[in-house]
Amino acid sequence: MGLTRWIQGIERSRDRTVWLALRWFLILTIALLLAPPGSGRTPGAYQIALLLAFVLSNVALTFFPSSRIDQRRLEFLAVIADTFLIAVALFSAGLRNSNLPLVFFITLLLSILGASVSRTALAATLTAGLYLYLTWRTSDGAGMTEVLLRLPFLYVSALYYGHIVVKAREEMSRVRRVEREKRDLETLVEVTGATTSTLDLHEVLYIIVRRIALLVRALRCSIITVDEERGLAAVLASSDDPTVNGLALSIDKYPEIRQVMQTRRAVVINDVGAEPSLAPVRARLKALGFESIMVLPLVHGDSLLGMLILRAARAEQVFSEQEIAACQVIANASANALKNAMLYDQTRREAESRRQTAEKLQNILDHFPDLIYTTDLEGRITEFSRGGEAMLGLRRGEMLGRSWEDLYTETEALDRLRRLQSIGETQPAFETTARGRDGSMCEVLVSAAKLNDVHGRVTGTLGIIKNIADLKEAQRHLVQAEKLSAIGEVISGVAHELNNPLAGVLGFAQLLQGGTLEPKQKRSVDRILESALRCQKIVKNLLAFSRRSPSEKEMVCLNRLIEKTIEMKAYQLKVNNINVAKTLDRHLPKTLVDANQIQQVLLNLINNAQHAISQRGLQGTLNLSTSLRGQTILVRVTDDGAGMPPDVLGRIFDPFFTTKPVGEGTGLGLSVSYGIVQDHGGRIWATSTPGSGATVHIELPVRSTERPESPAAKKAAPAPSPRVPPLRVLAVDDEVVLLDLLTDFLERDGHQVETASSGREALSRIQDRDFDVLIFDLKMPEMNGQELFERVRERRPELGERVIFASGDTLHPETRRFIKESGRPCVDKPFKLEAMRDAVIHVALAGRGGRPAAAGPA
Ligand code: ADP
């Protein structure tokens, strides 16, 4: 800016010097004209005064500092005065009236031709020639000297006016340039303003293109982006359509764009009609009225961001240098604007995508069931997911800023995590307990790791806590179930082996009891029978435990069952000073259970509670509660007895585990209960605080689908045994003692008994003999009772209708199914003799068409 002004200053001072010089020449030539040397003519006083005035004025103008006064106005006044002087000189030089049009013509010629000094000189020469010619033609005899003296005057006058006209023209073009520059500047200001007023890319670009279109009077001004690699372009904004935003262009159709892409330089086509490269698209351009095109690259650094395209329909069809320069300046400004807006757009999109990612992550964190937390280097919690709320009752708000150590209780877990926190030692996932808000403990699996930022710097730790309480519970159940099933196998075998000798003991003891004995002997036999019955009960329990007989289910109201069970135990509980409290849910639905089995479970639990209370003191409280949770009934049996330490609590469902004194506990109560509850599709577990009591929890599903068998159909009351005539009985068993027992017993009833110790022997017996009743043991080596029965039916179908089975394992599902399908009666081993007698009589009666025998032994 300073340089321009300095140059302008030099130019102006040079112009002024020329002008002042011309004035000196003008004054001199006029003086010569008014007093030509040798003519003897002296100028009049007023002419001398005028000349002196001009001399003085020029001296003043020469030495007067130009900055003091308004230069232009002064020069204007001087030019008017000078014109007056010239006019005076002209008239004084003896120009006649007829010469006036000539003077006017000369002045006009000078003005028109005075565009430059050279033209002015030419005009002055022409004027001088013309003057000489006219003077010569109209010469009135004036001396030649005078005529010649007019020449310098005219010459200088011409130069003087020519100079003024040149100056005026220069001034005018300067004014025009300043105006254009002002317009350019305004555009630039507006463009720059647009880039700072809004960061909406489209808005910025639309303002730019509209402003440029106005500036260069273009029909359309557009800004496009280009993808050089893929050869694609898109119009970001167009001055004639504010809605254009991202319109795709195929670069193939725009040779001028391709050219700019290749050269990175502006392309100016001033005449579309004459440009060979536009031949393929000329018709289309012409149809749209585009006569000239200018394409400017928008470059930022090394990258071509896009282009500014101008299409105009102008008469002169030329983009001037100034326009191109102005457009280039604006294009550069636009490139910056475009870059800024693109950067902003990109940043905004990145921020948006980061926000969305953060939201997504937060959402995942919020819905992730595990607890995820992070800590800083000082161990303060910096993030805490919502999983912690459901798992431990801890909220994010209250945990942020607290130490991670508050979450754990076990020393080993704390040590491991401290090592991770302090020295970054990686830890494999481990199980521990986490502390809940209310101090409760939760079994968890912890995975923890160092937390790094994007530069790999450690910023803290990350921990994931998974609730594995259910998993551990399921694991414990599985272990328990496996343990039970293995033990069950052993027990089953032992029980079977015990059954037969026990049947002998029991049977013969009963026989002895029925005979005539001395009181002392009778007491002994009673003891034997009593002990044998106890053994029988144990064996039955063992079989129940190992086999888990299919239960006989019916729709039962558990509340009623609990009440009935308490009633059964009421007396015993009362004498033991135990209060019974019930919290029973009145809306409990009925469910399908084996009432006897569930009652057995309840009795076991009540017995245990009673024992635990008696261990602790003189009195206590037993609480039984029921509640419904969804489709599950929860039964709780709570006592305030001695409770159990954790090591006992972990083993109570193991078979034969007991803490009761020998003879008091078998250690089977809870393991049998476990099996029963599991058979019902439920769960049983215990909780206890040593010294303050224990609670056994049972969960049973609410079920109604299995159709219960009618208990009436199953358990028809046995009719009193009618008498039957002597029968022929075949008893088949591999146990000799049982064959002896049956023989002894049935012969006492007057029957005739034959025995066989194997299936094969039995088959040979029936070949040629007839029997009224056949008693088959189900479990025999080689050929078992089932096979024997089928063979008998094949050979002697009528004998098949007279078979009675004896089995030590009627609880086994297979056995039960076979007996049911065969339709034959079955007597449990070790049998009560009465039961065997009843079965024999019923078979005999059925064989005789139900007619009772007339007489027979009792
Ligand atoms: P048993 O009653 O024959 O010992 P159980 O299987 O019923 O066999 O019980 C096993 C053990 O569990 C008991 O010996 C006792 O130590 C413990 N137990 C069961 N219930 C309770 C209870 N309510 N309070 C304290 N200990 C109990």
Image (cartoon, rainbow, N blue to C red):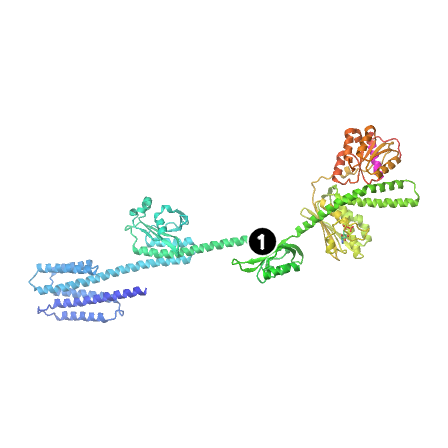
Q: Position of residue 584 (x, y in %)?
A: 73, 49
Res. 203 in view = yes
- Residue 169 image-quadrant placement: bottom left
592 left or right of 730 in image: left
Q: Amino acid at mark 1?
A: Asp
Give the farthest residue toward the right: 518
Which residue ends up furthest to the left in the rendered image? Answer: 141
Q: What is the span of residues highlighted in magenta in the rendered image? A: 833-844
Q: Quadrant of the N terminus?
A: bottom left
Q: Nearer the viewer, residue 56 or 129?
A: 129
Drawn side of residue 226 relative to residue 419, left or right = left
Label 1 neighbourhood size at 10 Å, few (<14), some (14-19), many (20+)?
some
Look at the image and say whether residue 311 sits in the magenta stretch.
Answer: no
Q: Nearer the viewer, residue 168 or 49?
A: 168
Q: Residue at x 62, y 59 (%)?
A: 417
Residue marked by disc 1: 366
Is residue 688 or residue 238 the one in the foreground?
688
Q: Where is residue 121? Give x, y as percent.
A: 17, 61
Q: Main secondary structure of the magenta part?
A: helix
Q: Which element is circle 1 on?
A: helix
Does residue 841 belong to the magenta stretch?
yes
Residue 587 in view: no
Q: Position of residue 839 (x, y in %)?
A: 82, 35
> Who is closer to the viewer here, 419 or 68?
419
- The answer to whether 320 is drawn above or below residue 39 in the figure is above
Quadrant of the frame with the C terminus: top right
Looking at the image, which residue is at 87% across and 46% down? 527
